[in-house]
């Protein structure tokens, strides 16, 4: 079915309602369009596509297997093609009985394909212990489950037992590689992996309501507000004042002890005007640099931009500024009581790329306030950096608003408990309360901007 899959993947990637036979033949790079009809007939027989009129076809979105293909293609793009072959089906059947396999337990002729799947999609994941390579299937991930469903493959092992085995294996391998002797670090690693295996760090596949008609009123309010700024000097003055309030609050939420007057003095007159700890002064100066970046709408929301924002906020503070975390991190309160776990180091880059892909797929579909809210929450659940995640999350929230023509908002330190509570309530995919909270802030702050 390789040719048919190429056609379906092409249709999914192009996101059009319907396709002519000429367009579909181009996915196979056929010289003559007539050559595509045998493959289209097979797809029609399987009810993967429907014929709209002579020479015009569309995906049959009521077909569950098409739903599975679309989900997988949205994540892996062109690399999805490797997943829908007969060879991959046989490999998955082998893993469905025994989820962890050594290299020598896999047929030699399938090993290249297994490595390719692991490299391009990580539906199968590789681990190393000494000279031995292991591969295991990530059945807890939605793309893997969708692929198994597509091939009608049933899991024949105890998944809970398998997850426990993965946790033990990962902890054992990582401790050897990093020479971790600190039991606390090892425990964090184990807890984060359990959290990840249970999907608690991921909400993009749990999202409930994403359409909020009430937000349409914001479009009108925003356009009316823009009309007030006919004087460029006035808007500049207001943005400068807004930035000072934003920096004070975003740093205060993270524990910075500077007063509003001290922040104003540092930003207006220079750091030497305030006698405080160097770290607190540096946080303020760094926040201004980072904030300037989100007002430049020529920037593109991608991994490099996110790392650039982190570097700006943490330079001189964090030795790993501008890079994803290299040690396991958990979220604690000011008394160091555990509040939440985060995505394991090994899966952070992957989670972040999926988040970026999700943004690109939805940036023209969802209201900017909903888009920003979901992005912000998924970002903090992943917690990609060692420190500075909250600051970067709020910057990204506002970058999305500005990029889409809306005004930025401030999350106030005085209201941080409500802010944190709304973040936590969204962990099951219900972002409604967080969206309404942000709507309230937007409307209140728009009046006085």
Image: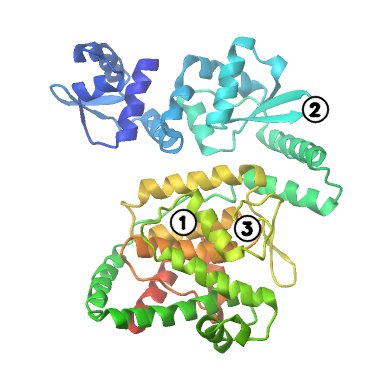
Q: Is residue 96 above or below residue 233?
A: above
Q: How is the image coloured?
A: rainbow
Relative to 440, is 265 on the left or the right? right
Q: Which residue is labeled 2 in the image?
A: 130
Residue 155 in view, yes or no = yes
Q: Secondary structure at mark 1?
A: helix
Q: Which mark is residue 86?
A: none
C-alpha separation, residue under disc 2 versus residue under disc 3: 31 Å
**Of pointers 1 and 2, the one earlier in the residue sequence:** 2
Q: Which mark is residue 321?
A: 3
Q: Is 104 or 153 nearer to us in this picture? A: 104
Q: Which residue is labeled 1 in the image?
A: 375
Residue count near mark 3 (Cα–Cα under 10 Å), binned few <14, some 14–19, many ≥20: many
Looking at the rendered image, the disc whose residue lies closer to the viewer, 1 or 2, is 2
- Which residue is drawn at the image coordinates 62% and 56% (left, top)? 385
Q: Picture coordinates of residue 179 (x, y %)?
A: 83, 43
Q: Is 19 or 67 nearer to us in this picture? A: 19
Q: Is 238 or 21 nearer to us in this picture? A: 238
C-alpha separation, residue under disc 1 versus residue under disc 2: 39 Å
Relative to 435, is 384 on the left or the right? right
**Of pointers 1 and 3, the one earlier in the residue sequence:** 3
Relative to 342, is 287 on the left or the right? left
Q: Picture coordinates of residue 230 (x, y %)?
A: 22, 79
Q: Is residue 333 above or below residue 169?
A: below
């Amino acid at each position: 079915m390789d040719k048919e899959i190429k056609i379906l993947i092409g249709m999914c990637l192009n996101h059009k309602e319907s396709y002519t036979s000429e367009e579909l033949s181009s996915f196979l790079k056929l010289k003559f369009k007539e050559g595509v009809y045998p493959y289209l007939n097979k797809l029609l027989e399987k009810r993967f596509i429907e014929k709209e009129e002579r020479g015009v076809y569309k995906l049959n979105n009521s077909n569950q297997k098409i739903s599975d293909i679309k989900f997988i293609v949205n994540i892996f793009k062109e690399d999805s093609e490797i997943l829908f072959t007969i060879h991959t089906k046989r490999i998955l059947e082998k893993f469905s009985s025994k989820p962890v396999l050594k290299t020598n337990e896999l047929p030699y002729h399938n090993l290249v394909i297994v490595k390719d799947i692991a490299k391009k999609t990580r539906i199968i994941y590789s681990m190393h212990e000494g000279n031995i390579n292991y591969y295991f299937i990530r059945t807890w991930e939605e793309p893997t489950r969708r692929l198994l469903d597509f091939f009608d493959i049933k899991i024949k092992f105890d998944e809970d037992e398998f997850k426990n085995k993965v946790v033990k294996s990962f902890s054992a391998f990582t401790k050897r590689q990093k020479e971790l002797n600190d039991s606390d670090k090892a425990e964090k690693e184990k807890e984060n992996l359990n959290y990840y295996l249970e999907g608690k760090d991921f909400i993009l596949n749990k999202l409930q309501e994403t359409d909020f008609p009430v937000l349409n009123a914001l479009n009108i309010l925003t356009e009316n507000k823009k009309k007030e700024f006919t004087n460029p000097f006035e808007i500049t003055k207001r943005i400068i004042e807004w930035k000072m309030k934003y920096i004070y609050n975003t740093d205060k939420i993270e524990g910075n002890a500077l007063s509003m007057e001290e922040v104003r003095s540092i930003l207006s007159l220079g750091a030497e005007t305030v006698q405080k700890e160097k770290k607190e002064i540096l946080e303020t100066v760094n926040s201004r640099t980072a904030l300037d970046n989100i007002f430049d709408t020529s920037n593109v929301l991608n991994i490099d931009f996110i790392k650039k924002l982190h570097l700006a906020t943490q330079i001189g503070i964090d030795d790993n500024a501008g890079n994803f975390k290299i040690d396991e991190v958990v979220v604690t309160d000011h008394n160091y009581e555990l509040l939440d776990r985060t995505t394991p180091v090994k899966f952070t880059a992957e989670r972040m790329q999926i988040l970026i892909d999700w943004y690109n797929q939805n940036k023209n579909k969802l209201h900017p306030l909903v888009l920003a809210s979901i992005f912000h929450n998924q970002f903090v659940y992943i917690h990609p950096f060692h420190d500075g995640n909250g600051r970067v999350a709020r910057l990204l929230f506002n970058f999305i608003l500005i990029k889409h023509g809306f005004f930025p908002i401030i999350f106030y330190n005085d209201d941080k408990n409500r802010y944190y509570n709304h973040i936590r309530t969204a962990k099951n995919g219900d972002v409604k309360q967080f969206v309404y909270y942000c709507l309230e802030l937007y409307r209140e702050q728009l009046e006085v901007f």
